[in-house]
């Protein structure tokens, strides 16, 4: 179990690096060097040209962990774009969200208070900056009625934007044996967020 956790952690850190590469681009010289990485899967993409600078088992399906929150945010961004949701809308922190993703959970959280009402804008900041599991669940329940229903929206949106090897079962990235992504799909998702939602993308650059 510990070995598996370390493997997932290494994969997650590398995937995060790939997303940064997709966001900001990397010199083409990277592709010409003897670049090696220890994690099992990796993909570096130049956002300006779409050129793949480096890849290693980019189509290997692995648990995405908190990187699943990229799709959670993308679904919320899409709901806003379609006019079904506003940044000023508020959702209530349910007991389920508080226990499963809040302070009592011991995981990543924005420490949303039980039964409090929080704006979509603040919840998005909680998801993106704090990696708050509670924020994810509150958004999921507020938009779709339940996290399971929201996962269905995630899966539908993944298909719409061409993620062929991703399966979503929750909004948080907490372990589910069926929830998987590939480095290639992660890069596609990152580029989609950057290109489609430039008004929201700056949140990813905020430190706190």
Image (spheres, helix red, strand yellow):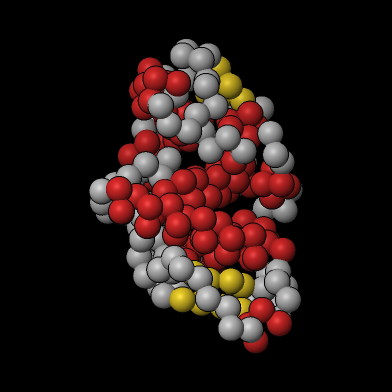
Q: Is residue 149 visible?
A: no
Using residue 95 as the reference point, say whether residue 108 is left or right of it. right
- From the image, which quarter does the C terminus lie in? top right
In-front residue for pair 160/111: 111
Q: Which residue reaches farthest top?
A: 115
The percent position of residue 124, horizontal first and vertical second, equals 60, 36
Residue at figure coordinates x 46%, y 29% from the top left: 134
Residue 27 horizontal side relative to residue 117, left or right: right
Who's the residue at 37% across and 41% down the image? 174
Q: Quadrant of residue 84?
A: top right
Q: Residue furthest bottom?
A: 32
Q: Is residue 125 visible?
A: yes
Q: Position of residue 167 (x, y in %)?
A: 35, 57
Instruction: Decide: is 198 above or below 39.
Output: above
* Image location of residue 114, percent across then percent down: 46, 14
Q: Is residue 125 above or below residue 44?
A: above
Comparing 14 with 159, the one in front is 14
Left/right of residue 66 with respect to residue 63 in the rendered view: right
User: What's the residue at 67%, 53% (across, down)?
Assistant: 197
Give the vertical position of 71 relative to 48 (above or below).
Answer: above
Looking at the rendering, which quadrant does residue 23 occupy?
Answer: bottom right
């Amino acid at each position: 179990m510990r070995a598996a956790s370390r493997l997932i952690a290494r994969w997650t850190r590398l995937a995060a690096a790939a997303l940064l590469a997709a966001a900001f681009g990397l010199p083409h010289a990277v592709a010409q060097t003897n670049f090696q990485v220890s994690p099992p899967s990796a993909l570096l993409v130049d956002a300006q040209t779409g050129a793949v600078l480096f890849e290693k088992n980019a189509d290997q399906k692995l648990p995405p962990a908190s990187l699943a929150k990229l799709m959670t945010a993308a679904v919320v961004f899409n709901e806003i774009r379609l006019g079904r949701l506003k940044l000023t809308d508020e959702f209530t922190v349910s007991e389920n969200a508080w226990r499963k993703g809040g302070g009592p959970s011991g995981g990543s959280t924005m420490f949303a208070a039980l039964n409090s009402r929080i704006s979509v804008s603040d919840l998005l900041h909680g998801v993106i900056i704090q990696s708050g599991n509670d924020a994810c669940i509150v958004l999921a329940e507020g938009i779709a009625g339940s996290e399971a229903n929201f996962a269905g929206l995630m899966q539908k949106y993944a298909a719409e934007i061409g993620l062929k090897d991703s399966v979503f079962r929750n909004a948080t990235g907490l372990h589910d044996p069926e929830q998987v992504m590939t480095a290639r799909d992660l890069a596609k998702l990152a580029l989609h967020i950057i290109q489609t939602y430039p008004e929201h993308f700056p949140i990813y650059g905020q430190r706190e």
